[in-house]
Every structure is written in C-alpha cells, then in structure tokens.
Image (cartoon, rainbow, N blue to C red):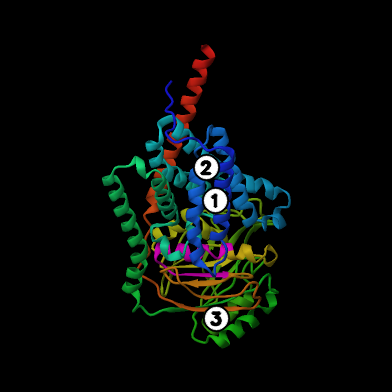
C-alpha cells in the first residue's frame, strides 16, 4: 500500500501548542459579546490555527490536538451547563470537542494518504460535513458555537454552514496557495466574491420587495413562571401601552397545563390574538410542549408542538407534525425555544410558506447572562438565512424582534422580568432556503465516504503488515 509523504514538514510539539493557543484565543474573542459584532472576524484565527493543527505526524496526535482545542473552546463558553447537569457537563463538553478532533483526524489522514493538494480541497468539505452532522443529524445535536453564529447576521445570506465552508476554504487555500495554479486561485476568488455579494445583497433585495407591505404589530411580555391568575392583568397593562397591537405573545411554559378560561375570555373581550406556551396534557405526566394560539373569539385556533424536545429534560413528546398558521396577515410558523436552533425544523416551516416565525422561549435566569447571549445569536442568523422576520419572546431575556435582513429592531434586558417587547414587522411574500441547505448534506456524504475509505485502507494495510 502506498502512502503519500506530506510535502510540508509535520508540526513539532512546540508549534502545535502555539497554533492550539491561537485557535482557542481567537475563538473566545470572536464570541466576546453581541455588542461587538466585528470581533466575529477573529473566527478566521480559529480556523487558521485548527487547519494548521491537522498537519501532525500521526492521525492519533491530530485527533487529540483537535479534541483539546475543541474542549478549551466549548467548555468555557458553555460553563452554564454545569449549573444544569453538574459534573455530567464535562461529558457533554467532551462530546462537542470530539467533533473538532474528528475533523483534525480526517484531514490529517487525508494529508498523509493522498497528499497536500487533494487534502486542501477536502478541508472545507470535511469541516462543513462534521459541523452539520453534529449540529443537526444525531441524538445530541447542538448547533451553538457554530462558525456562522460568530459573524454579523447579515453575512449569513448563504447560510450559517455555507459561511463556515467559505471561512475554512479561504484559510486552507491561503496556506496552500503555492500548490495552486494562478487560474485556480482566480476562479476561487471570483466564487468567494460572488458568495459574499449574495450574502450581502439578498437580504437588501428581499426587504426592498416588501417594504411597502403594511407591518403587523406584535407585543410580548417577558416573565418567568408567572402566577396564572395574574396573566389577564399583566396583558391589560401591555395592551394599555400598545392599543393597536393585534397579537400578544407569552413565553414557553407560561402555563403548566392547557389554556385557562381567563385567557380565552381576555382574547374575546379585547378582540386580540394571544400566543402562549403551555402543556397539551395527554395523561398524568405525559404531555406535548405546545404553543397555543387563542383567537379573537376566545377559542384555540391553532397550536404547534415542540418538534425537538431538549435531551435529558422533561420537555414533552416530540411534535407528530409541523404546520403553519394561516393568520389574517399571512402564514406564521412557530418554533418553541431550541427548535429555532435546528435548521431542519425551521426549513420545513419555510417550505410551507412561513412569512414570520414566532418563537416562545424558556431561558431560565439562573443559567446566566452568557447563556442568554449565546441563545440570542440564533434568531438574527435564522432571519437573515430565510429573509423573514422573527419575533422571539423569552421568559427572562433576551427577547428579540428581528427583520428579514437579520437586523434586531427591538430587544429586552436580561433578566428583565416584566419587560415588554414591541415591534412592527413586515411580512415578505415568502421566505427562501439558503444555498448551504443543499451544500451541507452533500458535504456530510463526502465526509462519510472519505472517513470510511481512510479506515478501510488503514485496516487493509494492517492486515498486510500482519501477514508479512
């Protein structure tokens, strides 16, 4: 069996730790704060260091360097998990770090097996394939801290996974530019520029098309486990400040059961629609985590169950189906809390023609400010991807109203008990799926083929050596 020797000398221990340190520092700077979106550009340093770390003497060493890098990036950012899961959080951090280690191992194996030139083309594909799989396709899927979430939302016109693809493509091609011809470099630069223009111009074009459409007013009241008997009074106070708003929203798990008559009567008396999170109980402790829509007639006119209940939580049964509400203003889709983090959930709503997403959310205050800030990165990115507005009402912050271009036009404080979120949002004719929804699954398939091929060739070599 023939193994191509790498044309670049593998990294020694000292340089490996320096690249590791660069990757970790740049990752944390990129996720510094929502207030400084420009720091997201430091994610290039993370990709830079990670790509360099794939140049190791052995695949095993590359995996361990990737694992450590991932752990040092994810564990501090997700330290709030300790308050939820205790010491078990260490295992969850390791699970997330595993995927970074796997990326480093696959790329290192490709370098050593097929040479630098072929590995260069595989780097962005493998990264996107691994990132999409860990974020969307297996039981512990978790999309937070993705490369796309680090950047300003409006750059995600091609999709958050597509943005990650572009970042790793630029970094890997820059480091291996001496291996490419001038024509190849020019073609790549033109493609990257076109993708960037697409990401910048698509939201602006979409907004221009529907800027004359009359907006719909929405009002949300931010509360964590409020006493049920006080809800009509609280809604009265919100209505007094927003007399023209037709839709009011309360968070996930506002109700510990179904919709009480008091809320139905409130909607009937004031001729308003109310979206409220509660439980559609089946028997005893078995229920669906549901967003109820109460109409102006005081009846439940629509309800949507949470599609992906949170792992290890008592969060109800998964939704048997997804539908959109044909409201008087257009088609409105509903995501409940973390459902918004999964593109495979939101994509379906957009396919059904959703023109607005309403997202009742439960973010417990004791999880801390940073957890809320990380969660607040999701809605702007998702809005920019589809070109549709999002109204996200959280229990204790940070609630947001986002335009179809990914611009946050209103938000509440953390923890902000009793804060009122008010916004007027224009509904476009329909949303559209970003380009990466076709690219990312393809990358998963290619990555799987590459991984299986590397494992098979390694196994075959070992058999030959044993026989010899």
Disc 1: which residue: 23
Magenta stretch in the rendered image: 374-393
Q: Secondary structure at mark 2?
A: helix
Comes first in the chain, label 1 or label 2: 1
Residue 78 visible to the viewer? no
Q: Is residue 195 positioned above or below 325 on the image? A: above
> Secondary structure under badge 1?
helix
Q: Quadrant of the N terminus?
A: top left
Q: In this orientation, which residue lies closer to the viewer: 116 or 122? A: 116
Mark 1 or mark 3: which is in front?
1
Name the residue carrying label 2.
53
Q: Quadrant of residue 353?
A: bottom left
Residue 31 position in % (x across, y down): 56, 60
Q: In this view, which residue lies farthest toward the right?
A: 86
- Give percent across and percent down for residue 57: 53, 32
Horizontal relation, residue 411 to residue 209: left or right? right
Within 10 angstroms of label 1, few (less than 14), some, or many (20 or more) residues? Answer: many
The residue carrying pointer 2 sits among few (fewer than 14), some (14 to 19) or many (20 or more) residues within 10 Å by Cα, namely many
- Which of marks 3 and 2 precedes in the sequence? 2
Is 236 on the left-hand or right-hand side of 422?
right
């Amino acid at each position: 069996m023939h193994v191509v020797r790498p044309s670049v000398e593998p990294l020694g221990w000292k340089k490996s730790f320096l690249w590791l340190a660069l990757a970790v520092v740049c990752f944390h700077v990129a996720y510094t704060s929502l207030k400084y979106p420009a720091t997201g550009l430091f994610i290039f340093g993370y990709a830079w260091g990670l790509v360099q770390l794939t140049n190791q003497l052995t695949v095993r060493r590359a995996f361990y360097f990737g694992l450590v890098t991932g752990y040092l990036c994810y564990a501090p950012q997700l330290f709030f998990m300790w308050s939820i899961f205790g010491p078990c959080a260490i295992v969850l951090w390791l699970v997330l770090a595993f995927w970074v280690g796997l990326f480093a191992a696959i790329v290192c194996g490709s370098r050593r097996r097929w040479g630098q030139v072929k590995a260069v083309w595989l780097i962005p594909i493998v990264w996107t394939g691994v990132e999409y799989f860990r974020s969307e396709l297996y039981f512990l899927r978790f999309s937070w801290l993705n490369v796309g979430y680090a950047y300003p939302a409006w750059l995600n016109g091609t999709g958050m996974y597509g943005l990650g693809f572009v970042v790793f493509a630029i970094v890997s091609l820059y480091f291996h530019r001496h291996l490419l011809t001038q024509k190849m470099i020019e073609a790549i630069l033109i493609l990257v520029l076109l993708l960037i223009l697409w990401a910048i111009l698509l939201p602006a074009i979409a907004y221009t098309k529907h800027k004359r459409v009359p907006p719909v007013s929405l009002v949300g009241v931010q509360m964590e486990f409020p006493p049920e008997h006080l809800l009509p009074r609280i809604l009265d106070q919100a209505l007094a400040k927003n007399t023209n708003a037709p839709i009011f929203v309360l968070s996930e798990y506002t109700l510990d059961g179904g919709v009480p008559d008091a809320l139905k009567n409130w909607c009937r008396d004031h001729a308003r629609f109310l979206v409220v999170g509660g439980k559609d109980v089946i028997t005893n402790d078995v229920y669906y985590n549901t967003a109820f829509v109460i109409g102006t007639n005081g009846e439940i006119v629509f309800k949507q169950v949470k599609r992906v209940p949170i792992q290890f939580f008592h969060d109800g049964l998964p939704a048997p189906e997804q539908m959109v509400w044909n409201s008087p203003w257009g088609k409105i889709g509903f995501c409940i809390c973390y459902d918004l983090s999964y593109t495979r959930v939101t994509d379906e709503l957009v396919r059904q023609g959703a023109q607005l997403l309403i997202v009742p959310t439960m973010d417990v205050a004791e999880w801390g400010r940073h957890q809320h800030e990380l969660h607040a990165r999701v809605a702007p990115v998702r809005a920019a991807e589809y070109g549709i507005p999002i109204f996200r009402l959280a229990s204790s912050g940070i609630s947001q109203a986002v335009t179809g271009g990914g611009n946050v036009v209103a938000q509440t404080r953390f923890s902000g008990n009793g804060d009122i979120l008010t916004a007027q949002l224009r509904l476009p004719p329909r949303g559209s799926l970003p380009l990466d929804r076709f690219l990312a699954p393809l990358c998963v398939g290619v990555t799987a083929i590459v991984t299986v091929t590397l494992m098979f060739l390694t196994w075959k070599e070992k058999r030959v050596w044993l026989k010899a």
